[in-house]
Amino acid sequence: MPQLSERAVRMPSSPIRKLAPLAEEAKKRGVKVYHLNIGQPDLDSPSVALQALKTINRTILEYSPSDGFLSLREKLVGYYDQYQIKLTAEDIIITTGGSEAVLFAFMTCLNPGDEIIVPEPAYANYMAFAISAGAIIRPITSSIEDGFALPSIERLEEMITPRTKGVMICNPNNPTGYLYTRKEMNKIRDLVKKYDLYLFSDEVYREFIYTGSPYISACHLEGIEENVVLIDSLSKRYSECGIRIGALITKNKKLRSAVMKFCQARLSPPLIGQIIAEASIDAPREYAMNVYEKFIERRNCLVDELNKLPGVYSPIPMGAFYTVARLPIDDSDKFCAWCLTDFEFEGETIMMAPASGFYSEEGKGKNEVRLAYALEKKELKRAIFLLGEALKKYNQLSSNRNQ
């Protein structure tokens, strides 16, 4: 039988989706599953977006340009200007979700064996895309005790080798909700400039910042304009994960030209998604404020309920809509699976993402889980109550086994 590629063998399963078959089996048994494992908001998409979908009058659903419709890119220029990110339409390439933007950035900038430094825990798919490009993730681990703040720049600099080509950050962070400070971003800038590295910056969650601290984009950093590759997506801010529209943004013309080869190879980003995305940018300010206020309420609710549970700790996330919580367990992979296969309380259970999948080093995150607060407050409270009941039963069973 032919062997699989080494790349396929090394490719990790998604910690966010790998337990989905167990959740489906639980639902078949009649168990209600509260999904805290995935960042899929339950809020309606903007009405202008839904109206655009309903009124598509094309008679041919044609290819679009490989870099996306110019009209969409021009509208995005105006959107980014709100955040003092000064761009032209030529700086923006439309991609099939933010995921494709990361993949194309890595494929364009990294050779097999090249290294990128990534603060962890980090979005699990960065590892998958690095493997696809033949690159190597060099993790620098942040601590839950420090609220997942960026480790010292001295530690980061110690990790640089002749094979280091870039630094990857997510700001605000998925999975921790951490927001990088101006001081931290300036230190990253200085390091990138000193060693002439790429700075890949995933800023998908810029609308979701819950602190007085300012949002500092990689595009705000002076002196490294040619080094920055900004990753974006419309999925989260408009509750449109399914339209698969993202963007790769850079001032580096040579890099953009190279990325376009990959864009042309995959022909074009989704036509229908671009139509919806362009309409979404016209959503009234009230839409964004309503979404923002709901997520503040949900964040406060989730963190308060988590920290009431014995042995559970969650720092207060400053952005995005996730938190990483420490639980009184020894193996979050086993616990999260057990919640779906063996546990139910009054016909209900909870689905979470084991945090081990957000670290590349074996053994990290074994007593942590990532939880998304993308459900309404009533459901969040019930879900965390179920988590408390699950922990009591799981640890009681573990204690009995060890006697």
Image (spheres, rainbow, N blue to C red):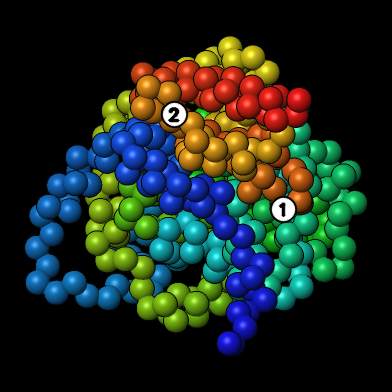
Is 272 on the left-hand or right-hand side of 18? left
Instruction: Give residue 337's position: percent from left, percent from top.
Output: 54, 42
Q: Residues within 10 Å of mark 1 (few under 14, many from 20)?
A: many
Instruction: Give residue 221's position: percent from left, percent from top.
Output: 66, 47
The quarter of the image holding the C terminus is top right
Residue closest to the eye, 171 or 395: 395
Going from N to C along the chain, the mark reached first, 2 or 1, is 2
Nearer to us of marks 2 and 1 is: 2
Displayed quadrant of residue 125 = bottom right
Residue closest to the eye, 391 or 203: 391
Instruction: Give residue 372's position: percent from left, percent from top.
Output: 49, 34
Disc 1 secondary structure class: loop
Q: In the orientation shown, which residue stands out farthest toward the bottom?
A: 2
Q: Could you tell me which residue is drawn at 76 percent across and 70 percent down?
A: 114
Is 6 on the left-hand or right-hand side of 261? right
Instruction: Give residue 264's position: percent from left, percent from top.
Output: 43, 80
Q: Could you tell me which residue is drawn at 45 percent across and 75 percent down?
A: 263
Residue closest to the eye, 44 or 309: 309
Q: Is residue 303 visible?
A: no
Residue type for callout 2: Glu
Q: Is residue 65 visible?
A: yes
Badge number at residue 360: 1
Displayed quadrant of residue 172 = top right
Disc 2 secondary structure class: loop
Residue closest to the eye, 182 or 105: 105
Displayed quadrant of residue 392 = top right
Q: Which residue is mark 2?
A: 344
Residue type for callout 1: Ser
